[in-house]
Amino acid sequence: MDPISIWLIADLGVVVAVAAAAVLVVRLAMRGTASHHRAAVLTAAADVIRAVRGRR
């Protein structure tokens, strides 16, 4: 297998892992949250994801 294919597969794996982690963070944060607090929880989860990605 050539190095470009290996890098592409590795990059795709990282993207999938980060996306799965973001979904799990949101699901865990939403569990047991009252409906009137969900907007604040989603905003906080989005802030954490942006910080991890380096955009804040």
Image: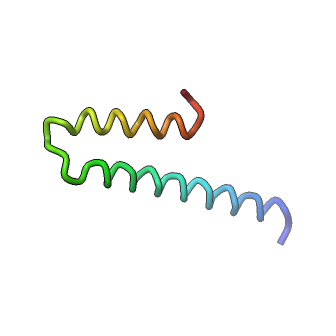
Left-right relation of 48 to 27: right
Left-right relation of 21 to 28: right
Residue 33 against residue 8 in the figure, above or below = above
Whole-percent x, y for residue 55 in the image? 56, 30
Left-right relation of 6 to 12: right
Whole-percent x, y for residue 42 in the image? 31, 38
Screen quadrant of the N terminus: bottom right
Residue at 77%, 64% in the rendered image: 6
Whole-percent x, y for residue 38 in the image? 22, 39
Q: Residue furthest right?
A: 2
Where is residue 36, by image quadrant? Answer: top left
Whole-percent x, y for residue 49 in the image? 47, 40
Residue at 54%, 27% in the rendered image: 56
Count of numbered circles on the image: 0
Residue 5 against residue 43 in the figure, above or below = below
The front one of 4 and 19 is 19
